[in-house]
Image (spheres, helix red, strand yellow):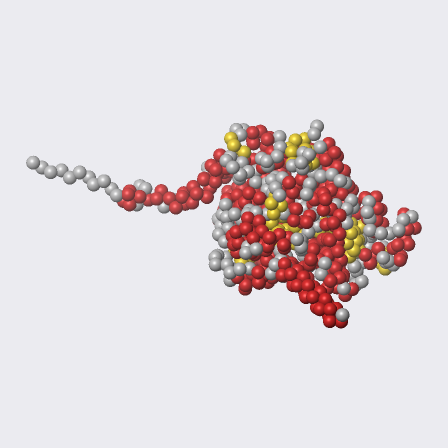
Amino acid sequence: MRKGIAILVSVLCLIALAATTATAQAKFGLNDIPTIKNKKALNLIIETGENHTKAIPAIQEFTKKTGVQVNVERVASSGVYGKENVELMAGTGFYDLVYVETAWTTEWSDYLYPLMDLAKKYDPKKEAGLKADLAFMSPSILVCGQAYGQQMVLPFYTFDMVMWIRQDVYDDPTEKANYKAKYGAELKAPTTLDELHKQAAFFTRKKGGKLKGKPLAHDLYGLSMQAGAYQTNDETSARLWGMGSDWVTVVRDSSGKIKEFVITKANKQALKDAITEYKMDLQWDSPGALTANFDFVVAQMGNGNAIICPTIWANCTTWANGILQEKVPGGKIGMYPTVGGHPYTGAWSYGVSKKTKNPEAAYWLVRWIASYDCAKIVFNDVGLPPGRIDVLEDPEIHTPAKYYPLGMVADYHINIWKATAKDVGNYWYFNTKAGGKVYDMQIYAVSKALTGEQTIDQVVAEITRQTLDLTTKFDKKYKIREEK
Amino acid sequence: MSSQTLPRKPSIWETLTSEKNFKWTLLIPLLLLLAIFMLYPLLYSFYFSFHDWGMQGAPTFSGLNNLRQLVNDRGFLLAFGRTLEVLVICIAVEVLLGLALAMMWNREFPGQNIVRGLALLPLLVAPLILSLLWNFMMDFDFGMFNQILQAVGLKKVYWWTPKMALYTICAITIWQWLPFSVFVLLAGLKGLPKDVFEAAKVDGARGWYTFRRLTLPMLTPLIMIIIVLRSMWLIRLFDPLFGTTRGGVNTELLDWITYRTAFVMFDIGYGSAMAIVSWAFTMILCMLMFRQLMKALKPKE
């Protein structure tokens, strides 16, 4: 009997060990890359910024393993589209790995290899090898990197938007009591526009006023937003999607296939409402917001100048927190979904150019960048959240010592992906070839409404006109029309 | 029977280096460069201005559609108007202030070399770097200027309000290019003939009269040169916007909207139409000014 139990326990242990080993082996790593005979160097872009610089050594591990040189070009995020689009259109093959913002994936799909095709050609495990690794990634982020059902790119880091609040302020008994006295409600992270506006007004204070019972050495703003001619459209998307609408409606047939795109009356009204709300929020923001990019918002939060950032990218959290810890002792950032719960989502990803002179090495480099080991380095050392759920679920970052901020950032992403997964695939950006062109047009159009250069009605009409024009010109696959 | 030798046909080299042709031969390298880097792109843009093309597939002929669209494009017309405004403001300030400074520095004074050397510095900085630096300095919350203002008890200024932003752009470009006007005019002042002024002094001419009747007419050709060159550069003003507003807050100018249309939205046809209109405007303006310059250079009877 005892002998039988001992044998059973041993077998069970062996099974458990085999399962663990199998799970560990399923995670792709550098050792899984076969010998690459073609040693032609690869060119890729990494964004400028100190944080991104820290990611370069992780990428250089690929060179140590394979002997294939990786040349990194530093380009500001606002300049990537222009730089790469020219090379792609001209077919130069200059960038072997193409750095892709989610909204450009479908547009550039003709210039990129479907990754499954490369897996079939170069991976010893064929498509199964790639699929096994994809199983650890966020399904909604993967959808963003698909075009017409094919996986074109893999995520480097994600840029889901988030709402930041100064959690220490929200937890302060004095502030809680004052808010309740004024508004008759508990002070908690806003979930509606009305709550957001009340809290923005509540926290906008002049120098000399008080915060947490202490006098302010500077003006305090309830909100901080990036309302310059940069990514005003992402902030607008968060508002639109939060209202359950979109820039354009993707109309599908009964089988789920896309029939056409329609700018409905509801879309136009929602856009008008979104821009109106955005413009209204500016009264509680610094005047500097009108020329601001995300670095300004990070600086505002980090220096304790603002209390709420209603729409900012979650990947900036560790950066802002680093400044906050230095400038505001006791300061703490809280992460919450943007109002409406459908923030702008996506990832900066890498795909393989069809004109690359080294497709095999390019495929493996994309796999490495999106791998568990590389993504873990990028998250832990650089603070950029990957598209990999396994990295975000790492128990090490969920210990009390490490939870703030990495664990908090991880949990935010896991939860927001779950909440938005069913909607992401139907957002218009991710289904059209005109995504990149329209995206850039929107930036300037929306900013004109915010600065008062044009009225909101004029801007909505202009965005409608240009969306129709650009989509007709650049997306030959689906027709677009306006509902009159 | 007498033999007659026919004149030998000169070789190509001999033709090119002959006294008659040599001056044109020396121009060939320049003409080649102009043809490759100016004429070819110009003709290329001209061609595409009559087409629709987004760098995908073949261009589609669209006739005058792009130009028709331009005439009704509010954004383009506003950018055009702003460019004219920037032109007038910058040239007026640079010429007037440049002349004033040149007149002040047209004498020996202690530290003159240091002052003049420092004055040259803005011209030595790359325009894009300068615009990034100004952007940081003028930031409402973190910028150096507002911190100084607060330190002396004054209110912070928002340099980028929709009403003020264009003038801030003008200030940045004037700050960089004013030394150009100053030094061209200073060189001009130094080169003026002293005997004419001495004669005028003997006749009792002083101050404003001398300036108006002697100095200014003699400096007119240089002033016209400054106006022609600066006009051409200001119509193409781009760098101050790239590092600051990026065309937002009512600062979008001709070059910026052209760049955005052609190289951000890759609407090459429409962008080319904008570029051609911009080029035509520059040519007309410069031709008019050049005529005035030639008049000014003509010796007066």
- Identified at 58% across, 35% down, the residue is A476
- Give B193 or B252, whichever is nearer the viewer: B252
Which image quadrant is residue A51 in?
bottom right
Q: Residue furthest front?
A: A1
Depicted B163 relative to depicted A181: above or below: above
Number of numbered callouts drawn: 0
Residue B136 image offset from top left, x and y in percent? 67, 54
Which image quadrant is residue B267 in?
top right
Residue B128 image offset from top left, x and y in percent? 59, 51
Q: In which quadrant of the rendered image does the N terminus of chain A lie?
A: bottom right
Q: In which quadrant of the rendered image does the C terminus of chain A lie?
A: top right
- Identified at 11% across, 38% down, the residue is B3
- Identified at 74% across, 34% down, the residue is A266
In the picture provided, is A208 more to the left or to the right than B187?
right
Note whether residue B298 is visible. Answer: yes
- Give A455 or B268, whichever is nearer the viewer: B268
- Give A61 or B221, whichever is nearer the viewer: A61
- Identified at 69% across, 36% down, the residue is A249
- Give A26 or B34, whichever is nearer the viewer: A26
